[in-house]
Amino acid sequence: MPVFTRFSGSSQPGDGAPEAEAEDELTGEEREEGERGATAASGPGPEASRASLGHRLTRLRTWRTRHPRTARALHLTTTALAATLVLGALLLPNTLPALKAVSFARIPAEAVIGAVVVLALPRRPRLVAAVLYGLGLTVLTTVNLLDMGFNEYLGRGFNAALDWDLLPDAQAYVEDTLGGGVATAAAVGAVVLVLLVAAVMVAATIRLATVLARHRVRATKGALIAGTVWVTCSALGLTLFGGPIASERGAGALRVHAQRTVESLRDEAAFVQQSKADTFGNTPPGQLLPDLRGKDVIFTFIESYGRSAVEDPVMAPGVGRTLDTSTKALEKAGFAARSGWLTSATYGGSSWLGHSTTMSGLWIDNQRRYRTVSAGDHLTLTKAFQKTGAWDTVGVMPGVQKGWPEEKWYGLDKLYDSRDLGYRGPKFSWSTMPDQYALEAFQRQVHGKKRDKPLMSFVILTSSHQPWAPLPKMVGWDELGDGSVFHAIQKAGNKASDVLTDTTKSREEYGRSIRYSVTSLTQWLERYGTDDTVLVFLGDHQPIARVSGNGASRDVPVSIVAKDPKVLDKVAGWNWTEGLKPGRDAPVWRMDSFRDRFLKAFGSTPHPSKG
C-alpha cells in the first residue's frame, strides 16, 4: 500500500504553515480517540486506561504544536519508510542473483489493490485489513528468504509441504560446523527475525492505512492513477531494466508456493502406489546377481562429488590430475575402470536422497518420498545381495551418529557407524573422521577378516562434506592408529567460518576435499583390493550453487573398478569412458535407472511385483 501522492498537513495549495500541518496530525479519528479518553479520565478500570491514552495523545498533540517542523519531518520519514518496507516486501525476489536495485523498479498490483481496499473501509475493518495485510507480507517475506536459502544450497525453492523436516537437520549441520552456541543463536535469531518482520510489517501497513484514510481524496486519486498506469503497462507489455513495469510478484510467489504444496501432496499419494511396483520385486534369490557370485562388491558414495569437480575451471585441473594419477596407479595394481554420469535426485545437500535413489531405482527427491519408501519393502540394490543369501552385507557410515533404522530397508546385516570404528581423533567440521581412517577401520574390522561368504559393503565417505574446512591430509597408512595423528592436522587447518564467507576459497577447498577423498579410496583399493574386489563409487550430488555455479547440472561421476575383466565386459554396452574420469560425451542416466541396469548387467532376471 504505497503512498502515491505527497501528503501534507494543509488542505490548500500554498497554505504550508507548520502550525496548521501539526494541528492536522491529530484530526479525525485520533482526536476522537483522545476526546473519548479525556471524558473517561475519572472512571476506573478500562476507562482509566482510556484516560491515560487520551492524556498521552494530548501531550503528543502539544509536542507537535510546539515543534511543528520536527513533527512534520518525523511524520514524512516514517510514512516514507513504511511505504518502502511494503513495496520492498512486495517486490523482493526469491533468489540471490535477482536481488538487484532494478528488481524494485516496478509497480506492484498488490499495493494498488491494498490502497483501494483500505480507502473503502471504515475505521475498525480498515485496521483489521491492515493487520492482515502486514501478516501476509510477513509470510511473503519469509518464504522468499527461505527460497533464497534453498536455491543457494539445494538448487530449488522451499516447499512448505515437505521441507520443514529439513530445518532440524540444518540446525544440526550448523552445530557440527560452527558449534552449539552458534546453532542455538541462529535458531533463536531466526525466530526473532520472523517476529520482528511481522511487527514491522504490521506497523507499516497500519501507518499507511491511517495516512491514506486521513487524506482520502488525494489518496483515491493517486490509487486511480497508479491503477491506470499498471493496467496500461500490463496491456502493452512495457518493460524497464529488462523486466515488466506492471508487477504481481507478491501474489505470484504465494500462488507458486500454494501450487507447489498441492502438487506435493498429490505426488505423495501417487508415489505410495509407485513404490509398491518393482521390476525385480518377485525375482527368486537364485536369479539375482548370478554373474557376481564370489565377488566382494563395494558401493561407495563420495560426499558432494559432482560434475563440477571434474569440469569446472577452478576445481577441474587438480581433480583431473588426481583422477588421472589414480587411474594409472590402479592399472599398475591390475585394476581397470569405466566411468559415466548419473543425474542426481538432489543438489547441494540431503545426501540420503541420492543414496536411496541409486539403491532403490525410484526417484526420491524429497523427504516425504524417502520416508515412504524406506518404511516399505521395495527392493534396494544392497538388499538384493542380502536376499540371495550368497553375501554378508554391511554398512560403513561414519556420518551416522545415532540409531539408523533404515539399515533394515537397505538390507544390511551389520552397520558400523561413527561409534563403532574406534576413532579417537578430532572431528573435521561436520565430518566425524577422515575418509582414510574410515577406510582403514573398514579394512581392519570388516573387509580384512576371513569369512565364509563374500562381502557386499555400502560405504559413505564424508570428508568432502561442506564447509570444507578444516580438511584432513593423507598420512602413512601404517601411522593411522586410532586417529590421534589427525589432531595436529585439524588444528592447523582453515576455520569453517573463514571458508564459508569466501566463495573463491570455498571452491578451492572443495576441490581439495574431492582430491583427498578420491585418493583415500583408490589408495585403499591398491593396498587391499583383490582379484575378486569390485568397487562401484559415485557422488551423491553436486556441491552447493555457490561452488558448482548457478545453473549447474545435477550430474555426478560414477565409476566401476575391477581386476577381473569379465566384470567390466558385462557393462561394455554402457559405453562408459575408460578410467576414473568420465568424458564430457559419456552417457548420462538418471540416478534411479542405475539399479535396474546394474541388476540386468550382472544376470538378474526381472519378475515384477505390482502395486
Image: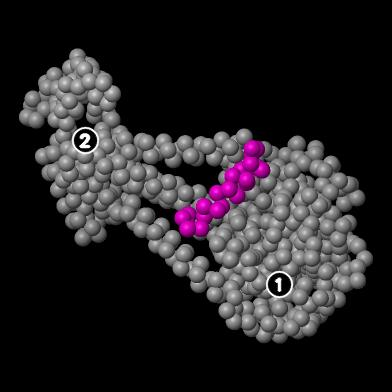
Amino acid at pointer 2: Thr
Question: Which residue, given by chain and number where applicable, does mark 1 sit on?
Answer: 381
Whole-number angstrom distance, CA of label 1 to CA of label 2: 65 Å
- The answer, for residue 457, to whether it is visible in the render is no
Residue 307: x and y in percent read 62, 61
At x 44%, y 40%, the residue is 194
In the figure, 608 relative to 25: above or below? Answer: below
Which tag, 1 or 2, sits closer to the chain's start? 2
**Residue 321 within the segment the image draws in magenta:** no
Q: Is residue 516 left or right of residue 55?
A: right
Q: Which residue is drawn at 86% across and 46% down?
A: 482
**Left or right of residue 415, residue 582 in this image:** left
Image side of residue 74 versus residue 300, left or right? left
Residue segment shown in magenta = 158-180
Measuring from the top left, give residue 334's x and y in whole percent: 86, 70
Decide whether residue 173 is among the magenta residues.
yes
Q: Name the residue carrying label 2.
A: 210
* Crowding near the residue tagged with mark 1, few <14, some 14–19, many ≥20 C-alpha atoms within 10 Å: many
Q: In this view, does 542 lie above or below 284?
A: above
Q: Residue 293 location, x and y as percent? A: 83, 78
